[in-house]
Amino acid sequence: MKKYLGFSMMIFILLTACREEKVKTDVDFNHYKEAFVLRLWKMNPGWASSVGYHKFDSVLVVPDKTRQEKERAFIQKELEQLHEFKLEILSEANRIDWKLIRNYLEGALWEQTTLKSGEWNPSNYNVCGGFAEMLGNNYAPLDERLRNFSIRLKHVPAYYEAAKKNINNPTKEHTQLAIEQNRGGLSVFSADLPASLEKSKLSETEKSELLKRSMAAQKAIEEYAFWLEKLPNPHPRSFRLGSTLYAKKFEFDIQSDQSAKEIYENALTHKKELHQKMVKISRSIWSKHMGKKTMPGNEYELVKQLIDQISLQHTKPENFQKDIEKQIPELEKFVRDKKLIYLDPKKPLVVRKEPDYMAGVAGASISAPGPYDKGGNTYYNVGSMNGWPAVQSESYLREYNDHVLQILNIHEAVPGHYTQLIYSNNSPSIIKSIFGNGAMVEGWAVYAELMMLENGYGNNSPEMWLMYYKWNLRTTCNTILDYSVHNLNYTKEQAMNLLVNEAYQQQAEAEGKWKRATLSQVQLCSYFTGFTEICNLRRELMKKQGKVFDLKTFHEKFLSYGSAPVRDIRAMMLAN
């Protein structure tokens, strides 16, 4: 009997070991990823719709306490399943996916239990963008989209009632942003929806019901904005995160081998290097632009006066968007002629006025289709100057002068965000697409600016290089500003001195950047961090590969990994 029991125990142990080993394989991890993503979309239907997965378009999640408990349970269960896989057993590509899933889950849990932005940031609550996307993207027949639109609308009043219960001691800056963006988004229901209904074939009954629900939704949105205006809040929370929260958010959002403080110190060094280059150029072309005017002895003043003079060359407010549209084909031709990277001619880029529900943070941005909607339009959102005082418009246009506007278009469009996001959507890993790393995405766009000029864009004119250095100085000062504001209690006066006097920004641009630093945290660090990491990787590969290094191959290989953190792409590219 003892022998029999011993033999049975041995068989049991062997079978158990086999099962454990099976769980560790790449095949099983791939199955897990597929199932995880479907569970993720069911938990986050709005996010699913934004990346082109439209199975849950009719669902609007009400952010009440029950939802929060359900989300915590989801995160904890997924973390348990994730840790069944041993990292060293997985392939390199799957190791990155494993880390991305873990980073998302742990970050989401930290957000809910520690950061708790849902309490102090009322702008977290805004349904307008999701509804606008349903009307604006032709991923399904109009009538089908409108029916899902109608079902989702039913839950808008409950959504905003839950939002009111969640909010506690909000910052005044995020409160004002929430009011502006929610009211701005009302046009989705008052203008866009009726226009879509006119084109639809819905029955009169369906249209009537939809409009009735739309009126209730608009009332809920307006009441939310009014409630925020009247909310008693004598001691509002500071918009500053503080060093502890900032360091942790940087870790989750940036995913770099370096800490926030290290990146900040690198930015300070880079700022000095840029100043030296700008002074050298300014001295060489001073007389060309300034004639016989005496060259200032102060180096900051020298560069500032020359930049101010060159910045007078700019477009008019009414032509701003048109000039952007005109430059896109020119950039595409340059990239193809120089063989810098493959551009897919079948992927459309649509330049449009920035939607009202997006206003208030950035003046130019890209809205790309998700990995499930690869054929959809990519939108280049351009801020409008309608209603601006002439002085403000002039300041803005001097910032985005004829030279800088080209660099902006490189960054946002070709071969920057627009190009990179197309590659990201073509990545074989859905995980790398949906959990795209912001530092890699922004870093690529900043890297693209330098790379284009290195290859002769702008005919190597000193004016273009001077404006590029000014633009890159802005990227660098984004990090200095963000870190200083949230960790070192930078005042607005200190920020204006940094941006206007040391980074040569126009007053309107500096004011906008200060506002952005008060409304966001860490994101402004992503540009400089990703940029320096990509430049360092290219330098390493050029040294390693020598004469066989090919720039186009490097670019396409780098982007083939999707929007993964640069540190992980670096590990794979150097290993291969």
Image (cartoon, grey):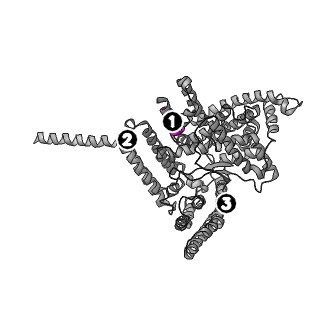
Q: Position of residue 549 (x, y in %)?
A: 55, 27
Q: Nearer the viewer, residue 144 or 382?
A: 144
Q: What residue does disc 1 label?
A: 569
Could one spot residue 444 in this view of the protein?
Answer: yes
Q: Helix or strand or loop: what does disc 3 sit on?
A: helix
Which mark sits nearer the N-terminus, 1 or 2?
A: 2
Q: CA distance from mark 2 to mark 3?
A: 47 Å
The circle on residue 26 is 2
Q: In x, y percent, where is residue 80?
A: 38, 47
- Side of 357 where 537 appears, left or right: left
Label 1 with label 2: CB-CB less than 8 Å: no
Instruction: Tell me where residue 293 sits by quadrant.
Output: top right
The magenta segment: 558-571
Q: Write the residue at 59% across / 31% down.
A: 535
Based on the displayed image, in which of its 4 quarters is residue 281 positioned?
top right
N-terminal of the pair, mark 2 or mark 3, is 2
N-terminal of the two: label 1 or label 3? 3
Q: Please identify, in this view, whether the residue under mark 2 or under mark 3 is nearer the observer.
A: 2
Q: Is residue 143 above or below residue 8?
A: below
Tell me the mark number nearer the camera, choosing from 1 and 3.
1
Whether residue 158 is situated above or below residue 401 in the rendered picture:
below
Give the position of the N terminus as an image quadrant. top left
Q: CA distance from mark 1 to mark 3?
A: 40 Å
Residue 103, x across and y down, in percent = 48, 43
Disc 2 element: helix
Read off the residue under disc 3.
184
| 257 or 456, nearer to the observer | 456
Q: Is 176 included in the stretch rendered in magenta?
A: no
Mark 2: amino acid: Asp
